[in-house]
């Protein structure tokens, strides 16, 4: 293996993968955070570092609930057998007592140069101030954060670009609506598209419909577009399709798409800088193309109507969960779309 890299702060998942592929390693890795997918994938990469013939003697997998700090440090201080390096992976470290996990700072501060230690706290932040400070100085910390609904679109766009593809804006929204923030599923679907379409291809709505299984004509993107333009016939046709295909079109995703649209539309209405750049900055948009849909929506719904609609969406969200209503959620969705299309700007206080 290549020489160790110097300590680094807050690397991204792709950066760590590139370092591993280049044979550049830190002596200690602390992987922690709420999003388990990235931690699982990095652990798999570390598990495959050693050639198969070396793993029986130089690969150690320990589990937090069963291992104390002393046992972990004892293994780390051993020397590899007929190899350059040994790999020690501590899984489920979030289940260790805080004081036990923190004691590992003694090893990190005087680590064995022939051991690569990976501490994986899946689904939680690591406990232990001294351990964290020691890894900052001598190793590498990766915090795997959950991607929010607000940030999922640029995250999908970045992943598509990373795979050597480009993506149509409508296809991008279809992927967001169908997959949401499920990172394991998202990576799987993008990998599948990259394999099928080939390098340099564009991910189109037709490609998503054909390979991922989302209708290019009946999805949340099209519903929002129909509502933006007050196309009632199209909007109700989409709602009817959702009701006939509930598993592929959960109302919670539709409510989220509608809420995001109108909460951002409210920001649009109240933005002081009325230039294109001002609107894009306020809404966090990267492309003027995305701004056009807000311009269309703003012509259809003024500020008071937008506020009324946001209130209606919140009411729908509550009632669709069975609070204050036993009505079918798709009947409630149809009613919501009617209320949006006929909003007069009546604000209840």
Image (cartoon, rainbow, N blue to C red):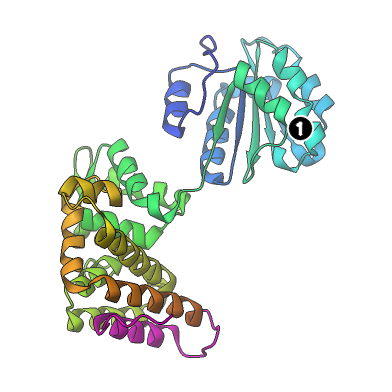
Q: Position of residue 129 (x, y in %)?
A: 71, 30
Q: Is residue 102 above or below residue 324?
A: above
Q: Mark 1 highlights which residue? A: 101
Return the residue nearer the eye: 273 or 138: 273
Task: Answer yes or no: is residue 189 visible.
Answer: yes
Viewer-proximal residue among 283 and 140: 283
Residue 56: % across, % down? 68, 24
As for residue 77 lying within the magenta part, the answer is: no
Name the image quarter holding residue 111: top right
Q: Is residue 302 left or right of residue 323?
A: left
73 vs 312, left or right, is: right
User: Under tag 1, what secondary structure?
Assistant: helix
Question: Is residue 339 shown left or right of residue 349?
Answer: left
The residue under the point 45% across, 52% down is 148
Question: Would residue 211 be seen by someone viewing this image from the given angle?
Answer: no
Residue 262, position as x, y percentages in the image: 31, 67
**Magenta-drawn segment:** 321-349
Q: Residue 248 location, x and y as percent?
A: 38, 70
């Amino acid at each position: 293996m290549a020489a160790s890299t110097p300590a680094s702060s807050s690397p991204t998942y792709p950066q760590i993968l590139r370092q591993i592929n280049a044979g550049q390693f830190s002596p200690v890795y602390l992987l922690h955070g709420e999003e388990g997918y990235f931690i699982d994938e990095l652990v798999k990469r570390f598990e495959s570092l050693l050639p198969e013939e070396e793993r029986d003697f130089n690969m150690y997998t320990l589990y937090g609930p069963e291992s104390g700090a002393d046992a972990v440090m004892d293994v780390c201080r051993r020397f590899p057998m007929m190899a350059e390096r040994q790999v020690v992976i501590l899984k489920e470290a979030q289940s260790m007592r805080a004081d036990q996990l923190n004691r590992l700072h003694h090893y990190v501060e005087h680590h064995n140069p022939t051991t690569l230690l990976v501490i994986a706290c899946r689904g939680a932040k690591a406990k232990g101030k001294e351990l964290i400070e020691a890894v900052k100085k001598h190793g590498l910390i990766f915090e795997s954060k959950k991607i929010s609904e607000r940030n999922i679109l640029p995250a999908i766009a970045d992943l598509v670009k990373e795979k050597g593809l480009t993506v149509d804006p409508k296809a991008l929204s279809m992927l967001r609506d169908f997959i949401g923030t499920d990172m394991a599923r998202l990576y799987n679907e993008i990998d599948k598209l990259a394999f099928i379409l080939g390098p340099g291809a564009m991910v189109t709505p037709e490609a998503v419909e054909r390979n991922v299984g989302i209708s290019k004509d009946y999805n949340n993107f099209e519903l929002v577009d129909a509502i933006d333009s007050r196309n009632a016939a199209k909007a109700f046709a989409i709602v009817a399709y959702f009701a006939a295909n509930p598993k592929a079109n959960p109302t919670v995703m539709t409510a989220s798409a509608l809420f995001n649209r109108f909460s951002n539309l409210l920001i649009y209405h109240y933005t002081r800088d009325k230039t294109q750049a001002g609107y894009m900055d306020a809404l966090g948009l990267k492309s003027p193309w995305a701004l056009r849909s807000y311009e269309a929506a703003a012509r259809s719904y003024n500020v008071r109507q937008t506020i009324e609609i946001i209130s209606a969406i919140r009411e729908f969200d509550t009632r669709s969960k069975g609070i204050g209503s036993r009505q079918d959620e798709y009947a409630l969705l149809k009613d919501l779309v009617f209320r949006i299309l006929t909003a007069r700007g009546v604000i209840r206080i």
